[in-house]
Image (cartoon, coloured by chain):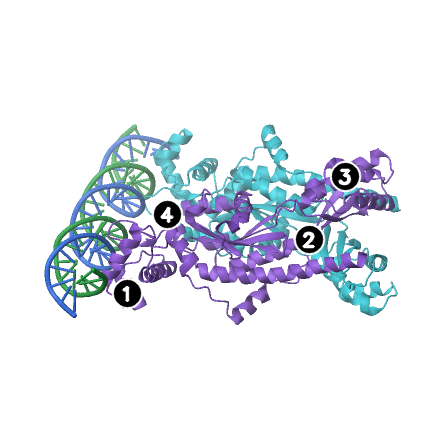
Chain colours: A cyan, B purple, C green, D blue
Amino acid sequence: MNPLDDRKKSILKAVVDDYIETAEPIGSVQLVARHGLAVSSATVRSEMSELERLGYLEQPHTSAGRVPSDQGYREYVDELMRVDPLAPEEERRIRGRLDDHFEELADALRSASSVLSQTTGYTSVAMTPRLRTSQLKQIKMLMIEPGRAIVVVVLAAGIVKDRVVRIPEMLDAETLAKISAAVEEGLSGMKLEDITLVAVTAAGRRAHLPDGLLNQILYEAYVSIKQADSMNVYTDGANRMLGFPEFAAVGKAKGFLDALASDGLVAGYLAETAPSEGGTGNPRPYMIRIGQEIALEGLDGCSFVTTTCTDGCTTLGSIGVIGPTRMDYAKVVSHIGFVRRTIDEGLRRLIDAGRSEEENRT
Amino acid sequence: MNPLDDRKKSILKAVVDDYIETAEPIGSVQLVARHGLAVSSATVRSEMSELERLGYLEQPHTSAGRVPSDQGYREYVDELMRVDPLAPEEERRIRGRLDDHFEELADALRSASSVLSQTTGYTSVAMTPRLRTSQLKQIKMLMIEPGRAIVVVVLAAGIVKDRVVRIPEMLDAETLAKISAAVEEGLSGMKLEDITLVAVTAAGRRAHLPDGLLNQILYEAYVSIKQADSMNVYTDGANRMLGFPEFAAVGKAKGFLDALASDGLVAGYLAETAPSEGGTGNPRPYMIRIGQEIALEGLDGCSFVTTTCTDGCTTLGSIGVIGPTRMDYAKVVSHIGFVRRTIDEGLRRLIDAGRSEEENRT
DNA sequence: CGTTAGCACTCCCGGCATTGGAGTGCTAAC
DNA sequence: GTTAGCACTCCAATGCCGGGAGTGCTAACG
């Protein structure tokens, strides 16, 4: 099915490898020299022209060297590249920078993003997931002073989100605690997406207090719960992209930064495409989107490598690297894999804490 | 003392105004044409050459137009520019985008930063202050599940910071509450800078519980308090700078982004220079740093306009705009002023809530 | 004496042709 | 099937030229 014989493959690999390194179109003579190929440049030339006909290579213009096409990169990442595991010292270095004693999901993801960008040299993104299907475990409202309270929402996955809200001045701590308990009792175990304002109100009514007091508070509780479901996106190292020759034109650079800055654009894209991972039956834990496969304005000439952090069942966040299509996929894949595993470990630790509580209860 | 006669001033103003708009060196002929000056271009020429001798203008090269020098901009912002108050509709637009129902300082500043960048078209920064001298008002530790608690720290200025921490599994909610109360009682009213681990431990001992349990918790309490004192920096709209011709060279653009990305660099600079505002006896509520006055690598050719948000006595945050030296100072000053006033109002609301509590207590 | 018109001079910038280098594709020979 | 040789192509760098915009100087003017 795959029309590439071994020699074509090795030539394609050599071209991609070289182009990743130099960002300059690769000529046949250079290629033979740099890789000590056993054939002459003329042979390579005819092979390259064949590879171009098949769609794996492109020529910026006649009589220039060849450059990989998106299809070429695709073949490269799917079949040709060699992903070496990280060197132990590299692992140590990353683990050192990765703050793995996080207690909050967002911290973990932010930290992962920052480290990924630093160690790969590309731009990174991290995203907390939509948690619609996650169960509410606890909701606590704690008075901090008359008129102000903090609402803490805990989800089944061990995720904690909190928020300061305004409450009626006359409300005292005990009453608030009572309301809080009533709401928690009524809603605990429900999926976030099923929690409506009506449900919250119904739960709150059990506290048997005058509606006047209740309404505002219950509304705030509702908003806090809904907010726990909101996505957060962090990006890091956008400045690094400007160092690459593909962004030598400011216009290109601005397009890229604008795309990143336009809130939710990248996030939306990632969220949308992430679940389709299994589509090709690809067993790899990461997803790669190359060049035109990303149909986002301003991100042409870029590739994504993304992966999702999970506690085993639910997706707890996505992290990814954005680089030029000419990025070092092997390096990025190994780095992102290691970071993901490290974060997953930490998450498991977090979840286990939650689990053990469940057991205590029963 | 000021060696500039009226005509020189008006010519300087005209040059700066035009240069701000066009980013091109200004020639004498153009200047008379655009401003309908009553004198001839020859006269303007001699005046300009005089202004250059005095240091207000510069020539990129012989036989090119003139460009304002840093000193020229300085004269412009201090004496020449006309700052018009915002149009009511503009005010409405800003107020609409500015989320002024914030309950947390950080939210307010982030929101301010985002709006500032949007409406001015430049890059913005916002920074929470170091709160060393602020008093600790409350510290509450709330169990969210066995092994995990949330620590909420409230400062006198009404600022709330919280953090999830790990605690010993065997600890129950009541015991934690007892410790929390003991710590709060012992530390409440102290300035953050005076709170040491020893002080926290001493306060916690009052709970009369075994040290084994206490130590870890008290340490976390200490860290949480110290963390409340940490600065947070938000920047927004860095991508906007790439639209300006002064950043047409990627190198320049990268330098700028690198400087912004290098955590704490800009923040440190702002924090350091902000208090010196009163230095010149300048009664204005904003501070302007022009070009070389900012001695930061990568930010050459840029200017800062910054201001501080306050509740009347303590500084509660800084917001600022970074643009090319050729920025529209008048516009930025009026915008930043309005945003600051709006935020200040909101802060006063927050603080008042705190005040009324104090009164209730006494 | 300040102001202005005229003029020579300077310098940048864009367009144009030239040239060298790197690469291709073709062909003929191995 | 592979390779050496060769003509051809195209880009990128270089140097050159001319127009345009601006300056500074000078001499004349009110």
The residue most toward the bottom is B89
Q: Which residue is mark 4?
A: A60
Of label 1 and label 2, which has the lower sequence position?
1
Question: Which residue, given by chain and number where applicable, does mark 3 sit on?
Answer: B200
The amino acid on which the numbered mark 2 sits, given as a three-letter code, is Ala
SS under mark 4: loop
Q: Are marks 1 and 2 in contact (CB under 8 Å)?
A: no
> Label 1: few (<14), some or many (≥20) within 10 Å?
some
Q: Position of residue A132 (x, y in %)?
A: 71, 57
- Residue at the image point whose x is 34% and y is 59% from the top: B12
Amino acid type, mark 4: Pro
* Mark 1 or mark 3: whose residue is earlier in sequence: 1
Name the residue at 62% across, 52% down: B316
- On the same chain: label 3 and label 2? yes
Q: Are marks 1 and 3 in contact (CB under 8 Å)?
A: no
Please tell me the numbered disc located at residue B32: 1
